[in-house]
Image (cartoon, rainbow, N blue to C red):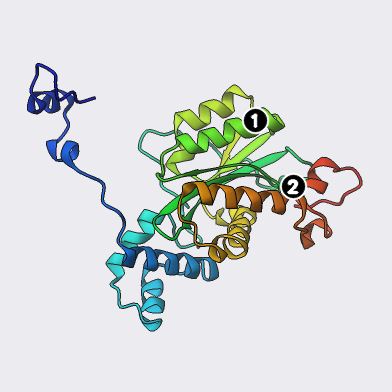
């Protein structure tokens, strides 16, 4: 956007774009190794004790030999995109001006594939740095329909996962998410509306609605991510892809009658309700 060889000076170009010159000259710095270690420990604690906030996490880290302030824990939690799970008005903060859609799942019996899909984002630690993972899941079968990795929390990788799921599996009746800005933005909701999908968003007291996909995050992290210190995005993409293939085709679930998500998704007849 800024052209250093342009007849206008860099200062004038920044003024016209209302862009601080400090932003133009800023060079992204790698996350310090100490912060990466703390973020991994916070992620492990969050999976084990999702109700813990920054104070409790700080206490656990200090007891484990990581002297850290609550402010630093809170800052790293914001970077990771995680919050304590408990009953509160909203599970995520939407961006100003984004439309919030009503909750459509109250009292609904989910008894078939492609009736309700859900999406969520989680943090993935690596040997150096970290990534964000979004997954789209069919609630009835627990099948992971699509996923994408990104090094930022922008909406584009969420939209890419959604478009892939719609192209491959068709449109669900309802798509449920929290009120995170990635899901309330026009790019995501317009894609759903164009496909004729009813949009549902978690509201007051609905934090339990993401329990299925939270269980998925626990599985993928303990069974794959924490066992491999990925060196980069390419290695992480290959490892996560291999795990989701295993998860869909081979990993059985007690709640599904010891069947795999693929078996329930592709052969729904004769199965009991799974949700």
Which residue of the protein is positioned furthest toward the right in this rendering?
270
Q: Which residue is pictured at 35% across the width and 60% down the height?
A: 76
Q: Is residue 169 above or below residue 34?
A: above
Q: Which residue is pictured at 37% across the width and 63% down the height?
A: 36
Q: Quadrant of the N terminus?
A: top left
Q: Which mark is residue 189?
A: none
Residue 203 appears in the picture as rendered = no
Left or right: where 79 falls relative to 163: left
Q: Nearer the viewer, residue 81 or 210?
A: 81
* Circle 1: element type: helix
Q: What whole-number distance in Å separates the C-alpha atoms at marks 1 and 2?
A: 17 Å
Residue holding disc 2: 140
Q: Is residue 6 above or below residue 34?
A: above
Q: Nearer the viewer, residue 63 or 212?
A: 63
Left or right: where 36 falls relative to 179: left
Q: Which mark is residue 166?
A: 1
Q: Nearer the viewer, residue 78 or 5?
A: 5
Residue 22 x %, y %: 14, 40
Which residue of the protein is positioned furthest toward the top in this rendering?
7
């Amino acid at each position: 956007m800024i052209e250093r060889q342009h007849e206008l000076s860099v200062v004038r170009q920044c003024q016209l774009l209302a862009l601080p010159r400090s932003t133009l000259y800023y060079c992204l710095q790698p996350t310090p190794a100490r912060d990466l270690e703390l973020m991994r420990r916070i992620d492990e604690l969050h999976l084990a004790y999702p109700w813990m906030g920054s104070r409790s996490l700080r206490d656990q880290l200090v007891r484990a030999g990581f002297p850290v302030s609550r402010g630093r824990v809170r800052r790293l939690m914001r970077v990771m995109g995680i919050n304590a799970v408990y009953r509160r008005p909203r599970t995520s903060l939407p961006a100003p001006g984004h439309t919030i859609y009503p909750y459509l799942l109250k009292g609904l019996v989910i008894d078939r594939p492609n009736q309700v899909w859900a999406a969520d984002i989680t943090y993935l630690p690596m040997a150096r740095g970290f990534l964000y993972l979004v997954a789209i899941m069919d609630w009835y079968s627990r099948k992971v329909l699509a996923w994408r990795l990104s090094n930022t929390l922008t909406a584009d990788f969420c939209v890419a996962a959604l478009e892939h799921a719609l192209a491959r599996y068709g449109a669900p009746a309802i798509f449920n998410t929290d009120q995170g800005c990635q899901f309330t933005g026009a790019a995501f909701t317009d894609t759903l509306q164009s496909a004729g999908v009813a949009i549902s968003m978690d509201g007051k007291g609905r934090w339990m609605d993401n329990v299925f996909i939270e269980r998925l995050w626990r599985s993928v992290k303990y069974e794959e991510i924490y066992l491999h210190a990925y060196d980069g995005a390419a290695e992480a993409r290959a490892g996560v892809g291999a795990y989701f293939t295993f998860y869909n085709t081979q990993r059985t679930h007690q709640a599904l009658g010891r069947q795999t998500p693929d078996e329930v998704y592709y052969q729904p007849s004769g199965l009991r309700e799974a949700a």
